[in-house]
Structures are given as C-alpha cells and as structure tokens.
Image: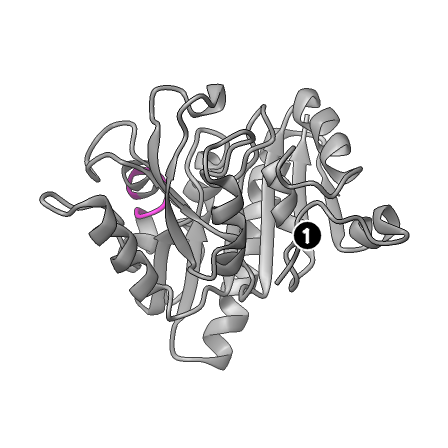
C-alpha cells in the first residue's frame, strides 16, 4: 500500500522519472496526438486479448479528444468503455459524465463500443458503487485522467471529507462526499476511481490545456502529498508511467 504524503529520499527526481510530457503547439495537434495515443494503446490490447477496457474522465477538456478518438478504425465492438468518476446524476442528465462520453465518443466508429453507466434509475449510490466495483474486476488497460484548477482528479478533491479513506481504499471505486470543496461545484455526491482502481492500468494519460494548468502541473509534480493535490495519484500510484498531454 502506498503511503501518500511520505517523502522518500530523492523523491522529486524519482517522481518526475515516472512522467512523460507531450507538449503541442495547438489544440488541434493536442487533440489528435492524445487521440492517437489512446487508440494505439487500445490497438495493442486488442492484439493481445479478446477485449480492451478504457476508463474516461468527464469535463469539457477531453471532449474534443473523445470526438477524434471516435473515428479511430478500431474493433470497437471489443472495447468496454467505463467512467473514471460520476456525479450522482442519472445518465441522461446534461451534467453527467455519462452523457458527455455518449455524445463525444460513442459516435462514428466508436458507436459499437460497450458503455457502462455507473448510475441508473432506482439504483442507490451504494448499489452503484458495488456495480462499478464488479465491472472493475476486469482491470482497465487505459485510463484517461483530468486535473481541476484545485488539483483534483477523478472526484478526489483536496480537503474532501474521508479523502484518506478513498486514497487508502482497496476497492476500485468509492462513494465520496465533496462537501466544502469549491472545485466540486454543486455536485457534492459522487462516485470516484481510487488509486487501487488506477493501479492495474498499463497506460495512464493526463489531458490538460492552458498556461494556468501548466503552472499548476509544475506544483503538482514538485511534491508527493496527495492530500494537497489529489492529482498526484496519477504518478504516485505504483504501476505505469504517466503520459501528460498539454497544449496552450
């Protein structure tokens, strides 16, 4: 189990060695560069196994990448798509991550992919978490993460009640309460991937845009306390190297 916040000797160099930075001159280059990276990882999985599993984050930042990815010539009927996190909303709600993924990715060639909603009508949040954890028994190959202005990732926010429990959980998904966390907006009840759920993935991508996020990224990479910036789980969690895709 990783202890988040315990700095080993030569931590900075060790952490930065687990990160690959991909910088682009334009959003168009960034969009297609990230889409090709995801498509290539899925292609390798499909060459080696019967199905590939992809976890996606919500938010406005990755939507263009998902739209580009939807055109990739993959055997999408062998790809399972699931969510990194979800607000406690029904799948058709305009603010749900499910709807964003359906409208941006599950089009064109990717319309054949198998998509897993976390929430459903009549399902309690506990039942939703249990269902997500059952699906997660098939470990993800590729996980696409984002980072908020407060340094959160998935639905793990700095200062969040029970953040310790989420970081240390052995379950891939947990329910979270983001009360008091400005970055969560009005959506306080959520379901989030944990470091345990991230760990099995062989490919991790962090998609960010803008100079503000680049400056925040430097602060994130300069420390190892996931309570300060939960986005640090992207490189602190043992396993794959983190590929960061950034454009101005």
The quadrant of the picture occupied by the C terminus is: top right
User: In this rendering, is residue 120 above or below 52?
Assistant: above
* 106 is within the stretch colored magenta: yes
Between 236 and 50, the residue placed more toward the observer is 236
Left or right of residue 134, residue 236 in this image: right
Residue 185 visible within the image: yes
Label 1, secondary structure: give it.
helix
Local crowd at mark 1 within 10 Å, few (<14), some, or many (≥20)?
many
Please tell me which residue is depicted at 27% across the width and 58% down the height of the picture: 130
Q: How is the image coloured?
A: one colour
The quadrant of the picture occupied by the N terminus is: bottom right
Give the x, y percent position of residue 17. 82, 54
User: In this rendering, is residue 175 above or below 79?
Assistant: above
Give the x, y percent position of residue 202. 58, 66
Q: Please tell me in which quadrant of the rendered image residue 152 appears.
A: top right
Question: Which residue is labeled 1 in the image?
Answer: 236
Left or right of residue 23, residue 61 in this image: left
Give the x, y percent position of residue 4. 66, 49
Give the residues drawn in magenta, as a range. Answer: 102-107
Q: Please tell me in which quadrant of the rendered image residue 25 appears.
A: top right
């Amino acid at each position: 189990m990783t202890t988040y916040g315990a700095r080993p000797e030569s931590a900075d160099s060790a952490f930065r060695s687990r990160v690959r930075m991909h910088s682009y001159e334009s959003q168009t280059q960034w969009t297609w560069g990230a889409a090709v990276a995801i498509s290539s990882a899925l292609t390798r999985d499909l060459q080696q196994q019967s199905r590939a599993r992809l976890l996606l984050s919500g938010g406005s930042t990755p939507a263009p990448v998902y739209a580009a990815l939807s055109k990739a010539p993959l055997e999408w009927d062998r790809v399972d798509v699931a969510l990194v996190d979800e607000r406690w909303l029904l799948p058709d709600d305009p603010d749900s991550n499910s709807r964003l993924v359906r409208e941006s990715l599950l089009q064109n060639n990717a319309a054949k992919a198998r998509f897993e909603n976390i929430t459903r009508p009549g399902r309690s949040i506990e039942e939703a978490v249990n269902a997500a954890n059952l699906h997660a028994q098939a470990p993800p190959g590729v996980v696409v993460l984002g980072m908020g202005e407060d340094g959160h990732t998935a639905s793990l926010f700095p200062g969040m009640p029970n953040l310790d429990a989420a970081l240390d959980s052995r379950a891939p998904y947990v329910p979270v309460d983001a009360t008091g966390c400005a970055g969560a907006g009005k959506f306080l009840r959520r379901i989030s991937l944990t470091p345990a759920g991230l760990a099995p993935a062989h490919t991790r991508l962090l998609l960010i845009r803008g100079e503000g996020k680049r400056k925040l990224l430097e602060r994130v990479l300069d420390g190892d306390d996931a309570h300060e910036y939960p986005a640090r789980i992207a490189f602190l969690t043992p396993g794959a190297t983190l590929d960061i895709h950034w454009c101005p």
